[in-house]
Each structure stands twice: as structure tokens, then as C-alpha cells.
Image (tube, rainbow, N blue to C red):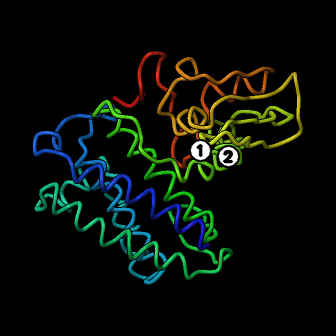
Amino acid sequence: MNKLAADLMAEYSNLANLCETLSAEQWSQHTDFYGWTPWDEIAHLLFFDEAALWAINDVARFGVETADLGREIAAGEEMSGITRRRYNHLAGPKLLALWRQRHEKLVATLRDLDPKTRVPWYGPSMSARSFATARLMETWAHGQDIWDMLGQERTSNSGLKHITHLGVTTYTWTFINRKLVVPEPVPYVNLQAPNGEQWAWGEPSEQNYVQGPALDFALLVTQRRNREDTKLTWAGDAADQWTQFAQCFAGEPADSPPAGVRVSHT
């Protein structure tokens, strides 16, 4: 867990350091993700990092909070509204300071867990390794919304391999979540890391594959880019279907953005 925890901390710090530079106006500027602001993005991450600490350290409290959240959502509440109500007393810099406290504690807690320890969550429990990877992916994806809003390139991608691995391993989930038949065989995935390494999964195939930059694949499976706006190439029916709506995160089926749009949830 040490390497994974270090990569998770690097992802948190990279985003937190970016947010330290935001002006008061930028904290309330709309991103392309549901029109959320950077404040909304950080409040969302804070909400679930606090929930993660309860899930590990106080299962009873986590159960109560989960039930409360379920009732609010069933009543038609949006997550953005729920987090605004909880943290509305905090301006951007103070929200950021609280988030730093919580995610630093979460990383330290995860680092000490056995990778196979089961952690309760919304739906099935997860191993500590999968749980940490999911937190990294969510932080990376919501951070991308802020980088896009600012028109800046990411300064670090230390957690990129974890996200691409999650993207590959959720191939089946993408189809099951949409109640579709899972096409076989699973495409061969061959990606180029920013440092020039090759990351590959599955049996090499010239008829059934997805290949290209690892960053573009991560943007695809987190649904921050349409496949047409990436440098990815693919072949075969399974790969064609998958790249249309690959989804590495839990929840209801979501659509990839239209070509030319960074994220679809506006």
C-alpha cells in the first residue's frame, strides 16, 4: 500500500496546490462538469473523503451517514446541493484547508491497512487497495475539471497508471451497468505512458485493441473526453462499443461528452 498511498497523496497535493492559486472569482467560476465551481468540486471530494474515514474508523457512523444521504437523494436532492449545505460556511481557502486535513489523515490511514482489508462503501465493500485507487481516480477526474476551466495542463500524473488499470478492469462493468451483453473477447489495451513506457493488458491482437496515450485513455474512461477528441485508436466491435461509453466509476450509466466538448455533464 505504500506506493499506492504515496501516489494518492501526490494526486491530492497536486490538486490542492493548484487550488491554492485560485482567486475569489475563480473559486466561483463554472467548470464544464454540471456547471460546478472549483468550490463544488473540492466540497464533493471533501464529503467523500470524510465518509471514507468513517467507513474505515467508525462503521456505525458511516451507516448513519449513508442512510441519511440515501434519503436526501431519494427526495430529489443533488449532491452539489447536499455538499453546499454542509460546507456553505467555508469560503474556498478554508474549505481547502479542511480538505487537506481530511485527505492527509485518510492517506495515513489507508497506508497502514492490509491491501485486502474490506472497506464498506456505497454498494459492495471494496478491498483497501481498490478503495485507495477509487479515491485517486475521483480526485484526478474532478481535478481535471478545474485544470480544464483554467486552460492549464496538468503538472503531474503520478497516479495515471492506477487510473488506466482501473479503466481496463472496469470493462465488464461498463456493459453490465447499462444492462448490455458484454462483448468478448476483451480488447487488448496498449498505452504509452508520459515517460515513454508501454503499459499493456490482455493478449496482443491486431483485430481487437485500444491503443494510444495513457493520458487520453484516462480521460476517456473518466468521461472527460469523447474518443474523437483523443489520439486513441481502436479496432474490433468490442473496442468500438467500449470506447463509445467506457465508464470506470460507479453509479448510474453516464454518457461520454459529444465531440468537441470536454465533459458531457453540463
Distance between mark 2 and mark 1 Cα atoms: 5 Å
Q: Position of residue 116 (x, y in %)?
A: 68, 75
Residue 163 in the figure: left or right of residue 204? left
Q: Quadrant of the C terminus?
A: top left
Q: In the image, what residue type sits under mark 2?
A: Thr
The amino acid pointed to by label 1 is: Cys
| Viewer-proximal residue among 38 and 117 | 38
The image position of residue 96, as x and y in percent, is 23, 60
State the image coordinates of residue 18 (x, y, percent, origin top left).
Answer: 29, 49
Task: Kindly identify the residue that appears in the image at 40 percent across and 59 percent down.
Answer: 12
Circle 1 SS class: loop
Q: Left of 27 or right of it: where is 258?
A: right
Q: Is residue 220 above or below residue 91?
A: above
- For label 2, the residue is 170
Residue 144 versus residue 88 in the image, above or below = above
Q: What is the crowding at mark 1: few (fewer than 14 residues within 10 Å), some, or many (at least 20)?
A: many
Residue tagged 1: 248
Question: Where 143 sits versus 90, above or below?
Answer: above
SS under mark 2: loop
